[in-house]
Amino acid sequence: MATAAQAIPAKPAKTQRSARQRRENFYGYLFLTPWLIGFFGLFIGPGLASLYLSFTNYNIIGESKFIGLDNYVHMFTEDDLFWASLGRTFYFACASVPLSVLGSMFLAILLDSKLRGVAVYRTLFFMPSLVPLVASVILWKWLLDADFGIVNQGLREIGVDDPPGWFVDRRMAIPSLIIMRLWTSIGGTQMIIFLAGLQGIPTELYDASAIDGANTWQRIRSVTIPLLSPTIFFNTVLGIIGALQTFAAAFLLTPEGGGPAFATWFYALHIWKNAFDYFEIGYAAALAWFFALIIIGLTIFQQWLSRRWVFYYGE
Amino acid sequence: MSQHFSRRQFLQMSGAVAAVSALAACAAPVAAPQAGGEAGAAAAAETVQLKWDTFRGPGTGWNEERIETFVQENPNVEIEFRPLTGASQQDNYGKMYSMFAAGDLGDVVAFDPSHYHFWRAIGGNIIGPIDDYIASDNLDLTQWFEQFIGLQTYQGNIYGLPSWGWAGQDTLVLNAVHFEQEGIELPDPVGHETSMATYGEWARKFYNDGERFGLSFPFGEASLVVLCRAFGGDLIDVEGKKSLLLDSPEAQEGLRWLYTMAVEEKILPAQGDFAAAQLEGRITMNWGGSLNVRNFKRDIKDETIAKAHQGLFPTDANGKFPSQIRGGTWNILRESAHPQEAFAFLKHITNTDGCYSFNLVAGQGAFVRPDVVQKLIEQDPVHEWFIPNLENGIPAHAPANSRGREYTDACAQYLTLLLDPNQPVPFEQGLQDLHDNIQQVLDMEPAA
């Protein structure tokens, strides 16, 4: 009886909850709709379209024909620039990312100290990252101009007879780009993220290690770096993705882009050239999809690897 | 009445939207037919609306002035000016091709032969021949330099009218101050008597380690072609199917001439801003074109450091002047609904006033009409120097397969490799690489 009496008023309450739930659901989806339209219309839709195009010979103005795996076969077996550009891109990423991550981490550690005027230093180091990329390329081209640049003029003044050709020397073009990248990236967003990570490390751990007699280096090695490892991981993943997508600097360095003699012909530039200069859109889509798979694979690999070295405090 | 709105339904709807988007995007490759035909004819009695898509002149007021003056004479025509403002001229072609595929490309467009898109646009049936309109209009084609009308012609048909153009990298922009200092007599600016050997000697004489370069040479297709021609050879054949580098001792001699200075003697500057360096008095002879001469003269601030002059290259065996006639075309969309009006507008933007005002406001080298050059000479006699090559130059040879961009890339990258002083490659190997890669491009499937 008591059970039945309780059940009777329970019914309208349930209906009321359902109506509210439905309303909430409706508004939830309504507010999600702009994002969903963007996600499906501007990301998933074009993504699927480009996947389809990668199996065609689409060149914008001509008839598009389904050619199966021809683009992929051409990529692996006939396109000399495919492997070369991939190799250059990995060389650039492998050299620039560790230097950039380590550099910004140690700079953040320095700037995390309680020095007077540290905010001014943080601002100064952050400023290069605010320089637009095109402006920084022009600046560095001017600085490192082989014949008329300030750097080589200075080197000649101190007795270096044959200074490097920098951007116009095939061997030095990528190292020069790495120098340019480090200038903008060491004090940039990565440093800010490291600073945020450092401020999340509990001070009692430093106090405890100090009581145990640890010196500065030991504290960095045994406290800072392990507790900063999630941030290192995050910056490394983003750094690798960014480095692999390097395009603009190489595009702007030489009149035709990618020079001298293909020395800065990176993979992203290879995609761009095929898509928007040669208008081989189908082939460029195949190049892009292969590259996307590489980046996804690398990220998954790093995620797997992170289990061995990333330490989450409190877990 | 309440309607159930489940996650499943919502996701199904979203999935449908995604599928439709994907299918719509997949359908895009098929080139859409352009508007035209009967609808156009029916509309002819009413106000005619033309679309003008151009990257030539936006921001200068030239386009607006041309529209205004045309509409005054043709009140039944309305022209929609649609500027294309890519970061560089080359950036605009992708947009133009996409507009064509979407059926939205304007009636009047410019597919510039300098960028090798002219031939691609013809091959892709984007622009159409205008011979019938020229004939019915009795248009006098001699009002333009013959060379530039020749450049509009492909397989016997004319596809455009020019309002700008130049003779390519056909001169050495000279700093007369250095010649005066060294007591060397300047060459005749309109003469072709100075030999390439003499230019080579001067390049060595004017070189002063760490301070000045006698000669600078841009590593690109435009300068490479003229280098080969200056020695009596050529880079590719007239049909655009064959690289001539290995068959032409003259072209090889030209490249050897340059290789000796760039790689063996290391007296050429690395690629950089040669124009700025020449203004500072650090380069004596900069391989360029008439535009560079004019701009050099214009930009000189101190005549004790730099004074403009030019040196031309020796006449070839056919009496032609080494050059590469480039640029300059306005075209009509093949499927334009109003080709007659588009042709009238084409004439309007390429007539004397059109060319002259384009040159003045846009700062272009619109040297395609003798009457315009005469007007420019009245303003600055330096323009007189450019006439011989405009009258007697050699046209650009385009790859028959419309692979112009791949061709220019191959030229620039492999020329840089051949002339790299930092990691020298033997001349024969560099030459072979350059030849092979140019030929590889010429052997590719047609682009359109």
Image: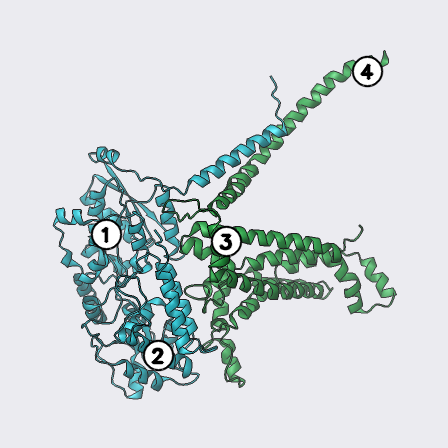
Chain colours: A green, B cyan
- Disc on res. A6: 4
Q: Are marks 2 and 3 in contact (CB under 8 Å)?
A: no
From this viewpoint, which residue is outermost toward the top?
Answer: A1
Badge 4 marks a residue whose secondary structure is helix
Look at the picture and state if A217 lies above or below A313.
below
Three-letter amino acid code of the residue under disc 1: Tyr
Q: Which residue is depicted at the point 56% across and 39% down?
A: A35
Badge 3 marks a residue whose secondary structure is helix
User: Which residue matches tag 1?
Assistant: B159
- Closer to the N terminus: mark 4 or mark 3? 4
Residue B427 position in % (x across, y down) = 40, 78
Badge 2 marks a residue whose secondary structure is helix
Cα distance between the residues tagged 1 and 2? 38 Å
- Closer to the N terminus: mark 1 or mark 2? 1
Three-letter amino acid code of the residue under disc 2: Arg
Q: Nearer the viewer, mark 4 or mark 3?
A: 3
Q: Are marks 4 and 1 in contact (CB under 8 Å)?
A: no
